[in-house]
Image (tube, rainbow, N blue to C red):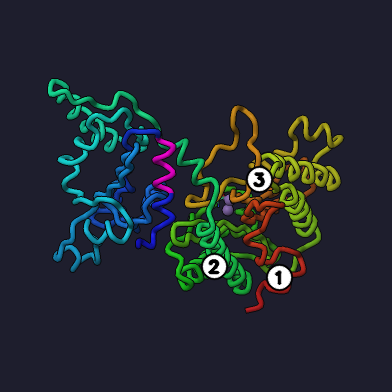
């Protein structure tokens, strides 16, 4: 019995959705970083969701209908290449281990796949995902079309696989949630380690190193995205990546970092004072963002729609901006004119899963979709104050974001990253304590 039962179940579910036809889904290619050095390999998320198969040069083919069949094409065993690059399953072992009905050599696709497409009504794949695959799949289709005088029909319809697969990926099953919990726990440990290690005079990359060390030490294969380690004014650059500035006493450090474990992402942001104590203005902004996050998380519940957490965060922030003298006018005016966007210009979260910005529509039929148990999202309000004569100087260059990963449950939600300190007291107690 294959240990990849969940993947087999997902393939069966996809076959039911397909209502006939053939699906073709390649994994991601290896990519050159420079000359003959590759980037660290990462499989395609859709392919991995349906197969669990981690090697490059692999394609899944599913034949739906009354007798569904799953076929894997993968690299052959190769003594020479395995000596240089390591183990390959090869088709026979891969079929057995990953629970496919058939497996063939990747080198035989041109020979086998046109036969699998013959007399099928529909070809399901992901048009436009990769130009080289578009061309190759069309050439297979043309090979079948060329056999029309022999009475063989080619699929007359092409159907995009994404809508069905995106919906399947949006609701996480028990094993996915267990993996995401472990990913969250590793990222939690990394943030604690980073807080403890923080000292004025270090560079941002010193904190980046602490994060990456803890991810890898605990077995996470990659960061889910490159960590943002932003001291002082750098925190107001939303996608800051340089991570190379010295960290100064009296400034805040914004750290947005999460690991990827067994394919699944985590995504945590915390903001702490480099010297270990928040100043009055920093604390005022921090407490406001924390209140906005608390209000947003309270709205994560089945039946509430996607945008309710965002609306709650925006309202809390807008009220606070007025109280602090950052925005002028009534709450209704600040919301109506979107004046709060001077300090909070991004949305409050995104789906989280195999991809950090995971798949899944946010609206259906033009309306924000309802939250359902098994969805996982981030809740990440922030406040970013650039120097501006219309703003009291004491707030200049303060950037704060607080981000957690939240699972929708049957009666509310569970914050998977709850353990990561975020009250002022907890953060001040931990920062610099290593
Ligand atoms: N780290 C990417 C994000 O928070 O969306
Ligand atoms: Mn995020
Ligand atoms: Mn993030």
Dot 3: what SS? loop
Question: Which circle's residue, 3 or 1, is located before the other in the chain?
Answer: 1
The quadrant of the picture occupied by the N terminus is bottom left
Question: Which circle's residue, 1 or 2, is located before the other in the chain?
Answer: 2
Q: Does 279 appear above or below 130?
A: below
The quadrant of the picture occupied by the C terminus is bottom right
Dot 1: what SS? loop
Q: Which mark is residue 276?
A: 1
Q: Does 117 appear above or below 232?
A: above
Is any atom of residue 32 visible in this view? Answer: no
Which span is picked out in magenta? 10-18
Secondary structure mainly formed by the magenta segment: helix
Is any atom of residue 38 visible in this view? Answer: yes
Question: Which circle's residue, 3 or 2, is located before the other in the chain?
Answer: 2
- Pointer 2 residue: 186
Within 10 Å of the Cα at label 2, are there few (<14), some (14-19), or many (20+) other Cα atoms?
many
Q: Residue 396 at what x, y percent from top left?
A: 72, 50
> Which of these two is toward me, 68 or 201?
68
């Amino acid at each position: 019995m294959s240990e990849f039962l969940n993947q087999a179940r997902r393939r069966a579910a996809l076959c039911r959705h397909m209502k006939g036809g053939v699906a073709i889904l390649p994994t991601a290619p290896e990519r050159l970083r420079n000359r003959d050095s590759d980037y660290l390999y990462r499989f395609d998320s859709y392919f991995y969701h349906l197969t669990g198969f981690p090697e490059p040069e692999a394609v899944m083919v599913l034949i739906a209908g009354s007798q569904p069949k799953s076929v894997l094409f993968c690299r052959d065993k190769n003594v020479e290449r395995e000596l240089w690059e390591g183990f390959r399953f090869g088709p026979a072992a891969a079929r057995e281990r990953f629970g496919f009905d058939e497996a063939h050599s990747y080198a035989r696709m041109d020979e086998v796949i046109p036969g699998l497409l013959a007399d099928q009504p529909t070809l399901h794949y992901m048009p436009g995902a990769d130009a080289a695959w578009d061309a190759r799949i069309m050439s297979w289709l043309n090979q079948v079309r060329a056999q029309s005088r022999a009475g063989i029909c080619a699929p007359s319809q092409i159907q995009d696989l994404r809508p069905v697969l995106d919906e399947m990926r949006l609701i996480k099953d028990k094993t996915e949630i267990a993996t995401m919990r472990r990913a969250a726990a590793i990222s939690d440990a990394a943030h604690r380690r980073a807080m403890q290690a923080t000292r004025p005079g270090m560079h941002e990359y010193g904190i980046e190193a602490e994060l990456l060390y803890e991810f890898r030490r605990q077995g996470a294969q990659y960061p889910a995205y490159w960590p943002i380690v932003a001291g002082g004014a750098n925190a107001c650059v939303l996608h800051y990546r340089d991570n190379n500035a010295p960290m100064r006493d009296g400034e805040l450090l914004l750290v947005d970092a999460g690991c990827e474990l067994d394919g699944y992402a985590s995504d945590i942001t915390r903001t702490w004072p480099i010297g270990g104590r928040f100043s009055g203005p920093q604390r005022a902004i921090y407490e406001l963002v924390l209140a906005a996050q608390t209000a947003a998380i309270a709205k994560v519940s089945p039946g509430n729609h996607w945008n309710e957490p965002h609306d709650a965060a925006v309202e809390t922030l807008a009220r606070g901006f007025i109280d602090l003298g950052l925005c002028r006018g009534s709450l209704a005016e600040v919301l109506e004119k979107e004046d709060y966007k001077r300090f909070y210009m991004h949305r409050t979260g995104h789906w989280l899963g195999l991809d950090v910005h995971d798949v899944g529509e946010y609206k259906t039929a033009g309306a924000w979709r309802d939250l359902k148990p098994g969805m996982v999202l981030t809740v990440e309000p922030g406040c970013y104050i650039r120097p501006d004569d219309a703003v009291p100087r004491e707030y200049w260059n303060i950037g704060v974001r607080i981000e957690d990963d939240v699972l929708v449950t049957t009666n509310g939600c569970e914050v998977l990253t709850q353990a990561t300190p975020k009250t002022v007291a907890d953060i001040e107690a931990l920062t610099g304590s290593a």
